Image (cartoon, rainbow, N blue to C red):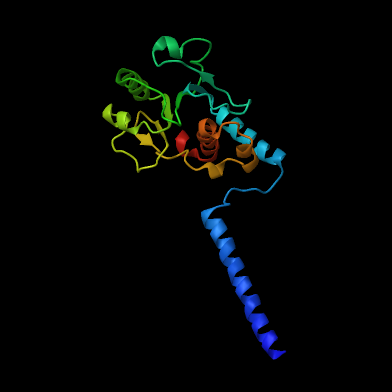
């Protein structure tokens, strides 16, 4: 009987230790996304993030893949970077605090010429333009002078503002920011997740607005 009590206690202690290790492993290597709350609460958080970004009164333009943000998110699609394509002085697009050009190319399928990148750089240099790139375009961005140094390997996003003096490579690389049920319902994560992460990031930190 003493034998079973002694080794039963040892076995129980081992299970407790193993359980603790499993919990630690889950927190560190996975399962970090908040799954608490109902689906409605998660969608409410996403809508609140959209409202926060909308409140900045930005003229948000998306070039490339449409990441199909929530219906409450205010943006428009564009097909080029010249004055005609951007239509900055039409339809009230100049009645804004700033412009934000989002190039959404998560799978690196878009071909943007060097001349077009120079057009983009000229927009950023104006000072009232944010540039968001979702995808790896860092080589050509460096070549035209949009960035001074290449970010670390694996970086998939960047934002540039303040006439190019401020930037945050990798700012939309952490999908843990997107509410769990919202991410689960995305129909095409490859084309959408970086954009949704971008919204959550922009709504969370004031650094982008200073």
186 or 40: nearer the eye?
186
Q: Is residue 44 left or right of residue 157?
A: right
Q: Is residue 94 left or right of residue 180?
A: left
Specify the quadrant that holds the N terminus.
bottom right
Confirm whether residue 55 shows in the render: no
Where is residue 118 shown, x and y percent of the image?
Answer: 31, 21
Q: Residue furthest bottom?
A: 2
Specify the quadrant that holds the C terminus.
top left
Above or below for 169 versus 55 = below
Where is residue 2 shown, x and y percent of the image?
Answer: 69, 90
Where is residue 169 shown, x and y percent of the image?
Answer: 39, 39
What residue is at 57 percent from the left and 57 percent from the top?
26
Q: Is residue 71 left or right of residue 172?
A: right
Where is residue 63 shown, x and y percent of the image?
Answer: 46, 21
55 or 85: nearer the eye?
85
Residue 153 found in image quarter = top left
107 or 27: nearer the eye?
107
Query: Number of marks in the image?
Result: 0
Confirm whether residue 35 shows in the render: yes
């Amino acid at each position: 009987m003493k034998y079973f009590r002694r080794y039963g206690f040892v076995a129980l202690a081992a299970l407790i230790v193993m359980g603790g290790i499993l919990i630690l492993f889950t927190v560190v290597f996975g399962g970090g996304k908040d799954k608490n709350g109902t689906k409605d609460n998660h969608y409410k958080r996403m809508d609140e993030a959209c409202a926060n970004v909308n409140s900045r009164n930005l003229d948000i333009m998306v070039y490339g893949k449409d990441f199909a943000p929530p219906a409450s998110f205010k943006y428009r699609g564009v097909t080029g970077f010249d004055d005609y394509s951007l239509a900055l002085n039409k339809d009230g697009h100049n009645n804004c605090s700033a412009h934000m050009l989002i190039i959404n190319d998560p799978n690196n399928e878009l071909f943007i010429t060097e001349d077009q990148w120079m057009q983009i750089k000229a927009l950023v240099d104006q000072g009232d333009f944010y540039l968001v790139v979702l995808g790896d375009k860092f080589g050509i961005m460096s070549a035209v002078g949009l960035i001074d140094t290449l970010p670390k390997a694996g970086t998939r996003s960047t934002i540039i503002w303040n006439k190019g003096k401020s930037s945050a490579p990798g700012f939309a690389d952490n999908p843990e920011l997107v509410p769990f049920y919202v991410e689960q319902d995305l129909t095409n994560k490859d084309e959408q997740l970086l954009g949704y992460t971008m919204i959550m990031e922009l709504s969370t930190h004031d650094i982008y607005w200073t």
